[in-house]
Image (cartoon, rainbow, N blue to C red):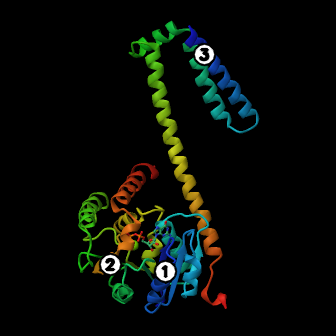
Amino acid sequence: MTFQVILVLFALFAITRTSRQYRKRKVSLYWFLLWTGLWALVIGIALYPTTADAIARFVGVERGADLALYLAVVLLAYLVFRLFVRQEETERSITQVVRQIAVQHPSKPDETH
Amino acid sequence: MKTIALIPAYNEESRIAASVRDARSFVDGVVVVDDCSVDRTGEVARAAGAIVLRHVINRGQGAALQTATEYALDALNADALVHFDADGQMVAREIPMMLEPILSGEADVVLGSRFLGRATNMPFTRRMANRLARLFTLAISGIALTDTHNGFRALSRKAARELTVTLDRMAHASQILDLVKVRRLRYVERPVTITYSEETLAKSPSSFRAFGIVKDILKDKFFTRI
Ligand SMILES: Nc1nc2c(ncn2[C@@H]2O[C@H](COP(=O)(O)OP(=O)(O)O)[C@@H](O)[C@H]2O)c(=O)[nH]1
Ligand SMILES: [Mg+2]
C-alpha cells in the first residue's frame, strides 16, 4: 500500500515537472507526451495492479509488476542507445568546429619576425 | 610535386623542434597540429619552421591528422602528404623512401612497417599486441599487412582526399586501412625504423590503448553507420 502511494506521488511529481519543462520549451512535444504517457501508465499499474496482472497474463507474463519491469529495461536500453548516438554526433560536431577554427587561424613561421 | 609533412602533436615541446627540423629537410613544408597542448608545443613548432594549426579543444590524433590534411590540400595545394610523428620515434631520413612510390605513381598509399625492417628494440609485449592487431585488421578490414598501426604513411593527393578520417582518437589508423580497401587504393608497405626510448614508452601503456582502439572501431562498425 505504502509503495503504491509513493509511486503515484512520484509519478505525479514527474508529470508536473515535465509539463513545466514543456511550457518553458525545454523539451519537445514528443518527449512531453512520451514521458507523461509513461508515468500515467505507472499510475495506472499502481492503482489497478490486478488489471496490470490481467494484461501481463494476456501477453504471457505471470505478473503485472514483472511486465512493467521488462518494459522498463527495454525502454532504458533504447534511451541509452539514443543518448549514445547523440553523444557521437555531438563529438563530431565539436571536431568540425575545432577544425574550422584551426584552419582559419594558421600561424606561419615567417609571421614571428 | 609539392610534398607536405603532417605532424599531430600533443604536449611534445621537448621533442617537436627536432622532428620539425628533421622533416623539413625532406619535404616542401611541415604542418603541425597542436592539439590543445598544455605546454609550449605550438610556439616551439613554429620557431622550428612549421605552420601550426591549433585545436582549441583536444580532439585526438586522428582528428588532428584530418585537420592537417584538409589544410595541406586546400590551403597549401599539396600533391603528396607524409604522416609523421612529433616524438622523435620516426626517422626523417626515411621520408624520401616513403614518398618514392607516390612520386613515381606506383601507389596511392605507402604504409610504414616495423616488421619489414628492423624495429629498434621493440618490446615483447608490443610485438604480441601487433600480432593480435594484424589478425583483427584482417578480420575487420580484410587487408593483410605486416604492421597495422604504424603512423608513418605517405599519401597521394587523391588518396588523401578519399581517406577522410572521422575516428578522432587512435582508431583512425584502422579506419585509414579500412578506407584503403573500400576505395580500392593502390598501397605498398615499406620498412621503417621506429625507436622505442624510455621516454616514449612511459607515455602510453599500449594494452590500455589497444582496448580504446578496438572499442572505437567496433562502435563505428556497429553503431555509427546506421
Ligand atoms: N593531435 C594529437 N596528437 C596526439 C595525441 N596523442 C598523441 N599524439 C601525437 O601522435 C603521435 C604519436 O603518439 P604516441 O603517443 O607517440 O603514439 P605511438 O607512437 O603510436 O605509440 C605523436 O606525435 C603525439 O604527439 C592527441 O591527443 N592529439
Ligand atoms: Mg610515439
Relative to B62, say whether A81 is above or below. Answer: above
Q: Label 3: state its secondary structure.
A: helix
Q: Position of residue B42 (x, y in %)?
A: 57, 77
Residue position marked by numbered label 1 in the rendering? B16
Q: Secondary structure at mark 2?
A: loop
Outermost residue, right direction?
Answer: A24
Depicted A54 relative to depicted B191: above or below = above
Q: Which badge, 2 or 1, is on the more N-terminal residue?
A: 1
Residue B188 horizontal side relative to residue B87, left or right: left
Badge 1 amino acid: Ile
The quarter of the rendered structure image containing the N terminus of chain A is top right
Report the disc number at residue A6.
Answer: 3
Q: x, y percentage for residue B19? A: 45, 83
User: Who's the residue at 46% across and 10% down the image?
Assistant: A53
**Can residue B79 be spotted in the picture?**
no
Mark 1 within 8 Å of ligand 1, using the beta carbon? yes
Q: Could you tell me the amino acid type at mark 2?
A: Thr
**For the residues tagged 2 and 3, is the chain the same?**
no
User: How would you rate the neighbour count of disc 2 (Cα within 10 Å): few for under 14, some for 14-19, many for 20 or more?
Assistant: some
**Quarter placement of the C terminus of chain A:** bottom right
Q: Quadrant of ligand 2?
A: bottom left
- What residue would you read off at disc 2? B195
